[in-house]
């Protein structure tokens, strides 16, 4: 069940990435990210109010329990980690093709896997190891494809941002597994979204707004709201998958990166990106890796 939920989350993440690319094209990154975090927070505020003031949500998956100060500190740390991944990821998506950033992000679970092996004692079988090796190989081939578009992986700062986003995303995944062993799904998702909004509000007011005329101007697009909708649902399904006792963060993270299927198709159909033949080979390796990971859970 938790593997199926991971695939559902992956599809929703793909829709999220498409709307993120549309929203960021010729647009300012910080305001888009702030509106995203604000909308996500507003989605969950009603659940807090109903949980704290009524009995309507008692006993349901959407109930938000009272949390201790220590719990809030732990969730605040998650918000900081996720924002670090988002900010670097948003800038890379804005400045690189989806057919480049998607596969780079798809290698994030390899980093998560390393941490899971060390921290949680997770062990992979033969099929799962084959899946991991194929994912690593896809990253190497992707760098070759990027060079044909004038994108040098070792000297392009947006590639560095994309890799940094994947690294901090992996740290976030490992931290999620730790949090979900002792915390409620709604507690984590609701409060980390609210803390992200507060942090982004501070960045917007004190760092971006005073210098807004020196950077790309902000333009409203309705896709900005769709970012929040798809992300919120994808995250809820993801957190719920991690509540299963036999769930493995290394596998869940790897499956979630199959969202590259959706983003690759969008890059070809809607954004008319180049060098698709070579990138399709990279994508095939990613997908083959996902298949082996799924077979390894059967």
Image: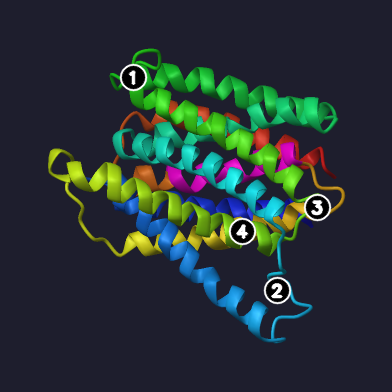
Q: Quadrant of residue 86?
A: top left
To which residue does mark 4 refer? 189
* Residue identified by numbered label 3: 182
* Relative image position of residue 141 (x, y in whole percent): 50, 19
Q: In terms of sequence position, does the residue under pointer 1 or pointer 3 come before the other?
A: 1
State left or right for residue 130 relative to residue 49.
Answer: right
Please give the range of residues in magenta: 249-264
Instruction: State whether residue 105 appears in this view.
Output: yes
The structure residue drawn at horizontal position 68% and vertical position 55%, both measured from the top left corner, is: 69
Whole-percent x and y of residue 173? 65, 40
Q: Secondary structure at mark 4?
A: helix
Q: Quadrant of residue 127?
A: top right
**Callout 3 touching callout 4 (CB < 8 Å):** no
* Mark found first going from the N terminus, 1 or 2: 2
Disc number lying in front (4 or 1): 4
Nearer to us of marks 1 and 2 is: 2
| Rendered residue at 34%/37% (across/down) | 91
Give the prevailing secondary structure in the magenta stretch: helix
Measuring from the top left, give residue 203's x and y in whole percent: 35, 46
CA–CA distance in space, label 3 to label 2? 16 Å
- Judging from the image, what secondary structure is the residue with disc 2 in? loop
Distance Cα–Cα, label 1 vs label 2:
45 Å
Secondary element at image label 1: loop
- What residue is pinned by disc 2? 63
Q: Nearer the viewer, residue 232 or 285?
A: 232
Q: Residue furthest top?
A: 154
Q: Residue furthest left?
A: 213
| Residue 270 seen | no
Tags 1 and 2 touching, CB below 8 Å: no
User: Would residue 56 be found to the left or right of residue 297 on screen?
Assistant: left
Callout 4–callout 1 Cβ contact below 8 Å: no
Q: Residues within 10 Å of mark 1 (few under 14, many from 20)?
A: few
């Amino acid at each position: 069940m938790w593997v199926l939920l991971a695939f559902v989350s992956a599809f929703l993440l793909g829709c999220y990435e498409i709307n993120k690319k549309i929203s960021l094209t010729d647009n300012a990154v910080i305001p888009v990210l702030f509106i995203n975090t604000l909308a996500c927070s507003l989605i969950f505020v009603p659940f807090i109010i109903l949980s704290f003031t009524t009995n309507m949500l008692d006993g349901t998956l959407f109930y938000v329990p009272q949390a201790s100060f220590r719990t809030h500190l732990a969730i605040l740390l998650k918000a900081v980690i996720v924002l670090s991944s988002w900010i670097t990821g948003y800038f890379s998506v804005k400045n690189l093709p989806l057919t480049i950033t998607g596969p780079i992000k798809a290698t994030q679970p390899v980093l998560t896997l390393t941490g899971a092996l060390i921290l949680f004692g997770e062990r992979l079988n033969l099929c799962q190891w084959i899946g991991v090796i194929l994912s690593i190989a896809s990253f190497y081939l992707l760098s070759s494809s990027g060079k044909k578009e004038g994108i040098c992986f070792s000297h392009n700062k947006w590639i560095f941002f994309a890799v940094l986003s994947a690294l901090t995303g992996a740290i976030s995944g490992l931290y999620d597994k730790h949090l979900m062993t002792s915390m409620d799904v709604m507690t984590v998702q609701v409060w980390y979204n609210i803390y992200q909004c507060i942090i982004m509000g501070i960045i917007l007011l004190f760092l971006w707004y005073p210098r807004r005329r020196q950077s790309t101007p902000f333009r409203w697009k309705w896709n900005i709201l769709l970012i929040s909708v798809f992300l919120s649902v994808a995250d809820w399904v993801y957190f719920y998958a991690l509540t299963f006792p036999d769930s493995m963060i290394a596998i869940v993270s790897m499956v979630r990166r199959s969202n590259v299927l959706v983003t690759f198709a969008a890059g070809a159909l809607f954004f008319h990106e180049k060098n698709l033949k070579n990138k399709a080979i990279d994508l095939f390796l990613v997908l083959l890796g996902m298949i082996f990971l799924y077979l390894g859970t059967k």
